[in-house]
Image (cartoon, grey):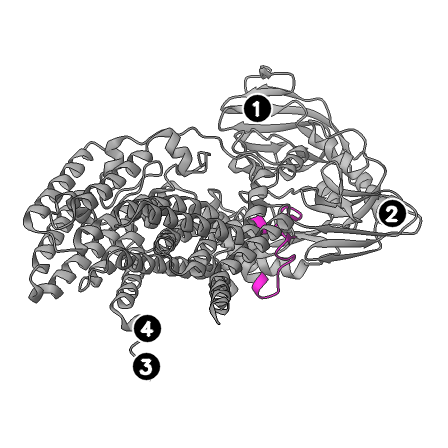
Amino acid sequence: MRTPSMPKPMLRSPRGRGAALAALLTVAIVCAGDAVARSYPFGPHTRSVNDLGNQFVPFHTRLWDLLHGRADGGLLLNWQSGFGSSFLPDFGTYLSSPFALLVGVFPRDRIDLAVYAVTLVKTGVAAAAMTWLLTALRRGRGREWLAAVLGASYALCGWSVVEAVYNPMWLDGLIAFPLLCLAGEWARTGRRPVLGTLLVTLAWVSNFYTAYMATLGAALVLVVRLLLEDGTSRERVRGLARAVRTVLIGIGLAAPVLVPVFLGTRHAYPGWNRAFAPAAWPDAAARLLPATYSFFSPALFLGTGALLLACALAFHRAVPRAERFVWAGLVAVVALSLQWGPTHLLWHAFATPNGSPYRQTFVLSGLVVIAAWISVATAWPDRRTLLGGAVVLALIAAGAASSTLITGWTYPLFAAGLLAVIGALVLARNGRFAVLAALLLVGAQAGQAAATTAYADRQRLNRLDDYAPWGERQDLQAAAVARADGWPRYRTDPGLEQSTANDPLLVGGQGGAYYSSHTPDVLTRTFLALGAGWTSNGRALHSLDNPVTDAVFSVGARVHVPRDPHQGWNRPDDRPVTVTRQDVPPLVTVRPAAGARLGRSPFRNQEKLLGASVYTVPTTTLRSADGTDATGEGAYDYRVRPGTYTLSASCPANSEVYLWAPDLFGRAQLGASGEQADFRGELPGRRAGMRMLGTGGGQLAVSLRAARAGTVPRGAVGCLDRGRLADAVSGLKRTGATIVDVTDSGVRAQLPPHTEGVAVLAAPRIAGWSCDGRPADSYLGLVAVPVSGDRTTVDCTFRPPGLRAGSFAGAGALATLLATAFAPAALTRVRRRRARP
């Protein structure tokens, strides 16, 4: 039997029911908007645009494999991508949210649906968390239902439904902001120190990037609360100190994940370097309104209800003057900070992001919702208050009129919502019409948010790259990889004709393709030297489809599938799914000491890593269609403009002819009957990979059709002798490891007796590798360790940089937390004992 002192179950309290209502309302509106747009899973249009399809779905697929014991590698080392990459930084960036674990309950071939479900759950939890925060800041008894509507408006803000919906790890920041504000509120009042610390840890582990922004926002809320509360300066300082302690200990507990993530970014290949340019103010104003879309302006849409109440706060005489102007001033200052360069850098940890420059917008959205709640929690706004708020909101809408972001739906939706909200707030003052008022407010929010969601769904498909959800293509590709798999005797590459830049994570295998914010610098530079292609300025590496590099990296099977139409290929491709096999050395081979460093020619670089001469690199001549010689571009390249060219070269008989043209955007064809090969180079953002054109000998003519201006190297042609390659592979097999045992965090290899030289592991020498108890050497970019003949075993292990330091920091933070939790009680017991006679 429940006693009066026991707390009510959450859903039996008005606050709990309000939080649950907010979550359900949010999920229903998102689904309704997606259904209107006929977006997956409610229609034929894919929702996997940009990095959602290219990164996040494949990474969640790897998480599924880890949860079901099917992954090659573990939490520390990923054997599937980039021929061996560090996984803990990727995990901490994309997968460390506890909600990500939900993918494990879905079938693997419904991974797109699983990620969508995770997105819905996160959005709903954000709405519930904000609702709980609002009623913690001001109880608003009898108005908990309105707190639920405002909580839903926060979770359905433009930033959420337009940007974060395809960056699902950002949604953890949407949850983190109200949770961190709660932790700050508990610190201010001296309550729940352990739970507040754990909320900080949860936020920073789930997604450190948005947690940083949420922490800044929560700090501002705490400062306002401290300024407005009744109490002495000493009490305010103590509350602030408790909050600082909570944040520091909470971040310390997250250090085992945070430090490897931080060092992973330090070792990553540099991405885009963009300068911040503030959005035009009419565009910023337009993004407050429904049915607008832009990538480079703050998505501040919240729904007319929240905006009207926030604008009305300054006119609401029932709210104390100090509260009115401090909260309104905070919203205005944060809004201005989004547009000023120095504060922009502060919000983004002093680095302008590669993509949207307004990733902190969710914090401003949360502050606007808090201001709206302060406006209504004390008393319903009167007509004067509503009139003042409506005038301010109308002026904002008028200021957006000149923006090109305004659509035909924007002002009708805005006007209808404004009328519905004003009517609802007028009716709400009379308790008899509370249900009608609630329906009007919910209807206005639902209609505007669903329309904005649907509009954003369609605009993303028109403006961003998109990727098909799991279907027949992925079924065939995954089945072919599974049949060919021979790991760790050899690698199986899922193919150059990729569905995403992370195909090895999506369909299996152990390929070279890899796309992450943590793509290692050494990996990208090694692939560059070997003639690989890339996108995203070098962070999305493509598979090396070449027999020499396959021998170097022990790729014994390679899958070939038709080109994916979602990758922008217009020409039909009806080739069947096939697998080509090649005799390759083991993962660990023995070489003489490394000679010269890698140079400019990828053909010569491949030979250096192979340890044998297998290419003829002839002198070339490039002529335009009218027979004139192409213009030189420096000492190493020809300059090409849109048009047709002929590249002439001479190869030995029966050579395989390869073309290396990283900056060519167009097509190449060997002779008149050869198959056309597509090149999509546009340096530095896109780099075309080396491609085989066919077999031939003697004087050759390669036809080039350039669609854009670019360059072609003077040493663009390589003639491969398959016989010499087979001899080189036989030599490496003869002296290579006899047994290779691969674990989730390393490799152990048995070598032939009396082996001397350098044992080379066919994996990039990224930071974290050690062999035989000391840091591993590098053999032209690969993991290496010297062997002198006195032992036959090589043992290499991988530990992500920062894991040890982060673990020590986490242990220290845990000890501090335990001391914080139990020291007061222990001191109390000691004092009681001393006080006894």
Between residues 488 and 138, which one lies in front from this camera angle?
A: 138
- Whichever of labels 3 and 2 marks the residue nearer the N terminus, that label is 3
Q: Marks 4/3: CA distance?
A: 9 Å
- Whichever of labels 4 and 3 marks the residue nearer the N terminus, that label is 3
Q: Which residue is denoted by mark 2 in the rendering? A: 735
Q: Which residue is denoted by mark 3 in the rendering? A: 2
SS state under label 2: helix
- Residue 228 image point, x, y percent: 25, 47
Q: Marks 3/2: CA distance?
A: 76 Å
Q: Which residue is denoted by mark 4 in the rendering? A: 7
- Whichever of labels 4 and 1 marks the residue nearer the N terminus, that label is 4
Q: Which residues are magenta?
A: 66-89
Q: Which residue is denoted by mark 1 in the rendering? A: 711
Q: Quadrant of residue 315?
A: top left
SS state under label 3: loop
Crowd rating for badge 2 (residues with CA inside 10 Å; few <14, some 14–19, many 20+): many
SS state under label 4: loop
